[in-house]
Amino acid sequence: MCNISSITEFLLLAFADTRELQLLHFGLFLGIYLAALLGNGLILTTVACDYRLHTPMYFFLRNLALLNLGSISTSIPKAMANSLWDAKAISYGGCTAQVFLLVFFISAELFLLTIMAYDRYVAICKPLHYGTLLGSRACAQMAAAAWGSGFLHAVLHIANIFSLPLCRGNAVDQFFCEIPQILKFSCSDSYLREGRVLVVTAFLFGGCFVFIALSYLQIFRAVLRIPSQQGRHKAFSTCLPQLAVVSLFMSTIMFAQLKPLSISFPSLDLVLAVLYSVVPPVVNPLIYSMRNQDLKDAMWKLMTRCFL
């Protein structure tokens, strides 16, 4: 038995025992990571370079790309290093940093997606008030609130989890440190303490989900009243990508973090972790660029200007 003062490192999940499969996993993670860097980096560069995209919607999209880069950079590089060097260990401080940063980036992303739903609601349902409600100062304040709320939420979890005595080993059944895995090592009443934080988390996530659902309900009602087919198509092209992102992101993370222990299996936990921490940063740029004609045109102009 050990307590919190005797633990100096955790052991992360090894994807394979043979050297060939470890190198295969390294190559797979490297490809995924580079795709995320390229996609989100391209969105950041395109929005920054094209003055026509200096609007609230693309300002929030640029913040989303930053959060995606931060989220995937928290988990994937360490998993790549472990596969490459045939290692499993992560220091206690490194594990703490991973939990903090993942909660920070994921929470901030959820709050930002909620703000982006509000942006689309105002743009479609109250277009005459768009400039007043979503001026540059208001957008900056809302983005800062999303980042700040994510930070405070992460501090709440870190202060609660890592103050618990850990006495049930240090082998994490995951390729990065996450809250449910760390709680497995804690003693007796840990879930009574963490339960209060989970209630706050469920309230915040549930509130965001209800707000997003109501916003899109009003959006779809307004879009269906648009007389021209071209107008409806343009409205849907800016809303459907975000709705797809929100659906994938919220469904997987809520199930992963709030599911009961009775349905916790290593393979299921691994799939869910990949779905909420790896897939969105890679897929989000593709979804937004494929469905948004203005962004596609700006990206094409930027690439044409760079290579010609």
Image: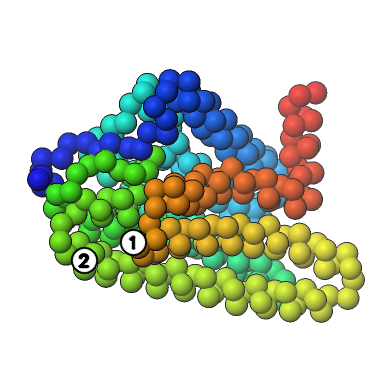
Residue type highlighted by circle 2: Arg
**Residue at image x 33%, y 71%?**
199
Which quadrant of the figure contains the C terminus? top right
Q: Is residue 3 above or below residue 160?
A: above
Along the viewing direction, whichever of 306 and 128 lies nearer the viewer: 306
Tell me the crowding category of disc 1: few under 14, some 14 to 19, or many 20 or more residues within 10 angstroms, Cα based: few
Which mark is drawn over residue 261? 1
How far apart are the two marked residues, 1 and 2, measured between alpha carbons? Answer: 16 Å
Residue 52 visible to the viewer? no
Indicate the quadrant where residue 259 lies.
bottom left
Direction from residue 11 to residue 252 in the image, left or right: right
Q: Secondary structure at mark 2?
A: helix
Percent position of residue 142, x then y: 50, 63
Percent position of residue 134, x then y: 60, 66
Which quadrant of the figure contains the N terminus? top left
Whether the residues at callouts 1 and 2 have beta carbons within 8 Å, the answer is no
In this rendering, the label closer to the viewer, 1 or 2: 1
Indicate the quadrant where residue 82 lies.
top left
Percent position of residue 176, x then y: 37, 41
